[in-house]
Amino acid sequence: MDITLQKSAIQKQSSVKITGSKSESNRLLLLQALFPEIELNNVSNSDDSNLMMKALASIEKIVDIHHAGTAMRFLTAYFAVQEGRETILTGSKRMKERPIKILVDALRELGADISYVENEGFPPIAIKGKKLSKHKVSLKANVSSQYISALLLIATKLENGIELMLEGEITSVPYINMTLSLLNEIGIETSFKNNVITVHPSKSKPKPLTVESDWSSASYYFSIAAISKVGTQITLSSYKENSLQGDSCLVDIYKHFGVTSKFNENFVTLTKETSAVKPLTLDLKNAPDIAQTIAVTCFVLGVSCDLTGLHTLKIKETDRLVALKTEIEKLGGNVEISEKSLHLKASKDIKPMVPIATYNDHRMAMAFAPVALKQPVIIEDAGVVSKSYPTFWDDLKTIGFNLTK
Ligand SMILES: O=C(O)C1=C[C@@H](OP(=O)(O)O)[C@@H](O)[C@H](O)C1
Ligand SMILES: C=C(OP(=O)(O)O)C(=O)O
């Protein structure tokens, strides 16, 4: 399904309720499978969380998690400690290109029985669940933090907890801290000092937990606010000022575009205060999922940006660096990329009615939607948004976007 977005202007004041964070949800669903007394509220209705739920409840041998990266990584660790259970964990064509060797090597080091079904280092994998005997392991930390979170999430199943020695520069650190905080919430003691993370054997104290709404999904509204008229306000729920999600750094980043954020109870209201914008330089190694949003905001506003810390973008739903360059250039922009950075030149004109390819990547579809505030645009295969935010298009319609399916 392609969606055509006519040139739109949003209401002066609007509000949107966004589904729960898929990152928090996928961690908590795994923890709930280990500690069934945990009660969860505002769990994400994303495909990735539904797939996680289904996989955890499945009694089938073959478990297919499609495009869901966190589910792939977290379930690799989970099934490795399900004693006596044999699982083949597989995914979409793209998932079979997303590396998993660092995690598999670490689990094998701890005693796990995992083998590759097709290509060495990539899903699908065959897992024979067993009790893991060791508790100390070193692993590279500069490729994906999801490997580290996966190991931390199963630490309570190991007699002596876990001690991880992280090698190299640590990427996506806020996601590791999110995992540790959620473990702490249910009474598990942890420490993270320099490059060593420890989960101590401790007794859990499960309790009801409410998932905060998804900050990566909120990023599209920060972009919309930044591109809208001065005075435009968008209220999002349910959000808190002290979030576990690293993408809440949007609050600071979008000040650069004249967008302020005010928290009140469980709402955050974004206000476009000023229209002056300057070139932007930003390191996104702690918030890789908002790179596409920010690049498109800059392009539409006609300002240049230098985004660094993007080394993980090449192994996500698609190679996001190449996808961004290709699609922004179709619209008339000029983008240079390296293996880990993106430079966008300032440009004035945006070509109308360009079909934007989305490469099975929800964030490509959502990041380019705000283009419609300046020019009509077509988003191809727009249903991809369901990976993290199934009601995205309906919500855009509610706030004033003029779109036809
Ligand atoms: O742990 C998580 O929930 C995630 C970690 C990040 O991945 P990397 O650590 O691979 O960058 C992020 O991009 C992904 O969307 C969700
Ligand atoms: C990279 C993402 O997800 P995952 O790695 O879990 O597929 C994302 O949601 O942007």
Image (cartoon, rainbow, N blue to C red):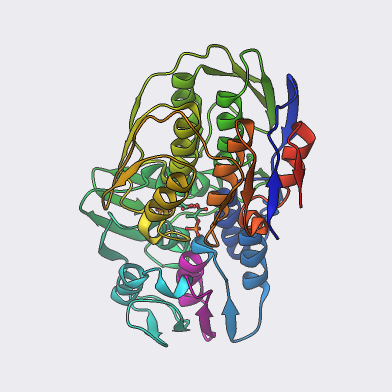
The x and y percentages for residue 191 are 35, 45
Q: Is residue 61 visible?
A: yes
Magenta-tinted stretch: 72-94
Q: Nearer the viewer, residue 246 or 84?
A: 246
**Is residue 179 shown above or below 242?**
below
The x and y percentages for residue 307 are 33, 37
**Residue 266 magenta-highlighted:** no
* Left or right of residue 301: residue 232: right
**Residue 76 magenta-highlighted:** yes
* Left or right of residue 335: residue 331: right
The x and y percentages for residue 16 are 73, 33
Residue at 46 percent of width and 66 percent of height: 73
Residue at 67 percent of width and 62 percent of height: 50
Residue at 61 percent of width and 32 percent of height: 221
Q: Quadrant of residue 372?
A: top right
Q: Quadrant of residue 98?
A: bottom left
Q: Residue furthest left?
A: 168
**Is residue 195 shown above or below 135?**
above
Residue at 55 percent of width and 24 percent of height: 226
Q: Nearer the viewer, residue 344 or 63?
A: 344
The x and y percentages for residue 334 are 36, 40
